[in-house]
Amino acid sequence: MDFSAKTGSAATLRTDCAVVGVYDNGRLSQAAREIDAVAGNLISGLVKRGDFTGKAGATLLLHGAAGIPAKRLLLIGLGEQGKLDMKGWRKAHGAAVSALLNTAAKNAFSFLSMEDVADGEPYLLARHAAEAAEETAYRFDELKSKIDPTPARLGRITLWFPDRKSQSAAARGFTHGKAVADGQSLARRLGNLPGNICTPTFLASEARNLAASNAGLKVSVVEEAQMKKLGMNALLSVSRGSRQPPKLIVMEWRGGPKQKAPVALVGKGITFDTGGISLKPPPAMDEMKFDMCGAASVIGAMATVVALELPINVVALVPAAENMPDGLASRPGDIVTTMSGQTVEILNTDAEGRLILCDALTYARRFEPSTIIDVATLTGACVIALGHHLSGLMSSDDPLAQEILRAGADAEDRAWRLPIGEDYDEGLKSNFADFANVAGREGGAITAACFLARFTRDLRWAHLDVAGTAWKSGRAKGATGRPVPLLAQFLMSRAGVA
């Protein structure tokens, strides 16, 4: 989808569809009033009759409105006047695109940007409009034998801005928003692909494909034989029950000064998780194809970095494996020696994500990163704690935690900080190894982070648990692509471009 910024009158502009807002209780926006004045009180009449109230996210599509050259008129509910924020702005544009995709409109002109939006300077309005539009337009139908023969025709959205200065800022916002959205769409696609297609080998090939079309991106893959030599026995303890060989995918982007230490992103890539010998219950086990969404988000974030050619050094590591209950699979009670030399008693084979991450975190040290962030669909406990709205953030580094929280707020991809420390770490004690891979039921998301913290001592490290935000269940089942927007914003801020 293409995006542009222009000025003009809602009452006189030619477009396939003019998009204007109506506030709660039928209060017309400025653009709606302009059209209403030349269209015989069309909008105010609908409001008086109760056909449109302005409830946030509501839509009403009108055809052939007299007095205006626009072929269609789309009314968007904006909620209570004076309280439109960036979340509401995104909701409004998502609703607009959803309605337009059901029409033959090839382009649309949105006048919603004429309204007052909290913190709504042109760059942010354009960026979030582009992200919301692309997120709404995303479809996953590549594995269906019959695809809708009449795909959506909407190809361009134009936002109203009054002058060249604001239009220039908006153009920059569109560029950034499109790059973030494309990275998010890539993450969604990888997450939505089934486990029989999206294997560790497939993930590695996708990373290589991204590098093939971008000369500045280097991709290498640590194979199983090399993992054995490196002593990655925690990662190998997970993959040994599967016929699919594990991979450690390494993606390097050197956009900053050579001497500048990189940011390292580490994404959990369990391409299917049965739980291993600690087998999961059957209901919703199909959703365990989403257990690689941490990996997908890291790859998606790298796609955004490459698209924007960010002046920053970034290394992404994706430990990828299947967790299957084969005769060779790890048993509860097995003890493995990690790449760091620390020993782990595996009390639960379904706590496998931390086992592949710990060796990847140790491997990441060779890049001497300035900061390291791991992303994982790690614990159901995080879903219980935070639901599906916020990702869980754990870090003992206060400035880094605040930087990540700020990036999430700016990107409308929020996280919530949970505690971490020695009190929780006590639960990992083992009678037979240095520590166990699980503690008790209480504070499960936190003790999982405590496990990872044992491999990141003396590093600036943060952990994002996205088990509640990386995908949706039910009728809307599918990967969300989160936290690509958060990671992208974090890196863009570090690079000084947003």
Image (tube, rainbow, N blue to C red):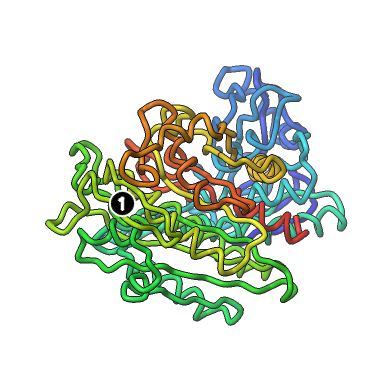
**Which one is nearer the viewer's eye here, 144 or 265?**
265
| Observer able to see residue 326 | yes
The residue depicted at 40 percent of the width and 73 percent of the height is 222
**Which one is nearer the viewer's eye here, 4 or 240?**
240
- From the viewer's perspective, is residue 79 above or below residue 416? above
* Kind of residue at badge 1: Lys
Q: Secondary structure at mark 1?
A: helix
Circle 1 packing at 10 Å, graded few (<14), some (14-19), many (20+), is many
Measured from the top left, where is residue 176 in percent x and y? 67, 59
Q: In the visual, does 277 lie left or right of 169?
A: left
The residue depicted at 41 percent of the width and 70 percent of the height is 206
The residue depicted at 54 percent of the width and 34 percent of the height is 422
Q: Residue 143 occupies which quadrant of the picture?
A: bottom left
Q: In the visual, does 118 lie left or right of 382?
A: right
Number of labels in the image equals: 1
Measured from the top left, where is residue 46 in percent x and y? 60, 24
The residue depicted at 65 percent of the width and 30 percent of the height is 78
Q: Which of the image's four quarters has the C terminus?
A: bottom right
Task: Tell me the residue that label 1 is attached to.
Answer: 289
